[in-house]
Amino acid sequence: MAQLGNLRHRPVRRLTQLYAGLALYGVSMALMIRSGLGLDPWDVFHQGLARQTGLSFGTVTIAVGALVLLLWIPLRQRPGLGTVSNVVVIGLVVDATLAVLPPGEGLPVRAALLVVGIVANGAATGLYLGAGLGPGPRDGLMTGFVARHPRWSVRLVRTVIEVTVLALGWLLGGTVGLGTVAYALAIGPLAQMFIPIFAIPTRPADAYAT
């Protein structure tokens, strides 16, 4: 995993891509929220907590990200710059976008918001992961657990985590719907498509390896 300060190779490109990806991720979350058609599991959880606590969606996203990052300690995971930035930037951007983006009116508009939000989320994932500066705290929790417990597959661990937060979020009042299913079906193929497009070699020698 890329460590804090590991920016000797193409730092401007990598930092620009990292923060563009995180900003786009926050915008994509706001688009799906405004669609009102359902959110991804973690955002169902964030929305449920926001409704119960009265805090903004972005504030809850930041708080949950920070708490999840603390769970990295027993897993001996080390955060990258992208990990720390993920905790803060996405929450700030989603709140800023929600402040200026009105809810969608009519099913066609809401469906368009959902589709654009899901595709943008996939592109954002490719951008910030491709920068090679560390995964988000939630993804790192999953991969760190698998690294410490190799008998568990990534698919199983991710499923258990996401079903758990989805159920908790739904019980707290988060929006589960068509968008939740659409996200679950689409995000894997979208990420698989976008990550190679935006991947930046972390060492100069890597550029000549192919």
Image (cartoon, rainbow, N blue to C red):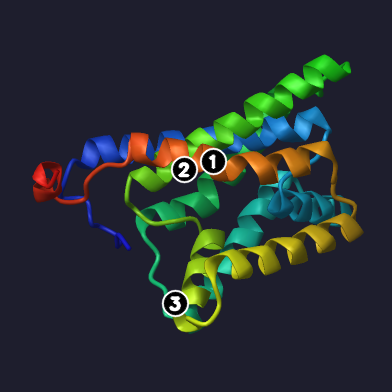
- Label 2 and label 1: CA atoms lie apart by 5 Å
Question: Label 1 is placed on what type of residue?
Answer: Pro
Q: Secondary structure at mark 3?
A: helix
> Is residue 136 left or right of 4 when viewed as pictured?
right
For label 2, the SS is: helix
Q: Position of residue 204 (x, y in %)?
A: 11, 46
Which of 66/156 is in front?
156
Q: Do callouts 2 and 1 mark residues in contact (Cβ within 8 Å)?
A: yes
Determine the residue positioned at 90% across, 52% down.
173
**Residue pictured at 68% horizontal, 26% vertical:** 115
Q: Quadrant of the N terminus?
A: bottom left
**Camera sees residue 132:** yes
Residue 92's place in the image compared with 63, above or below, is above
Few, some or many C-alpha atoms within 10 Å of disc 1 (few <14, some 14-19, many ≥20)? few
Please rate how many residues cluster around mark 2, counting C-alpha atoms within 10 Å: few if below 14, some from 14 to 19, many from 20: some
Quick one: label 3 or label 1, which is nearer the N terminus? 3
Tally the marks: 3
Mark 2 — residue?
A: 192
User: Which amino acid type corresponds to the residue marked 2 in the rendered image?
Assistant: Gln
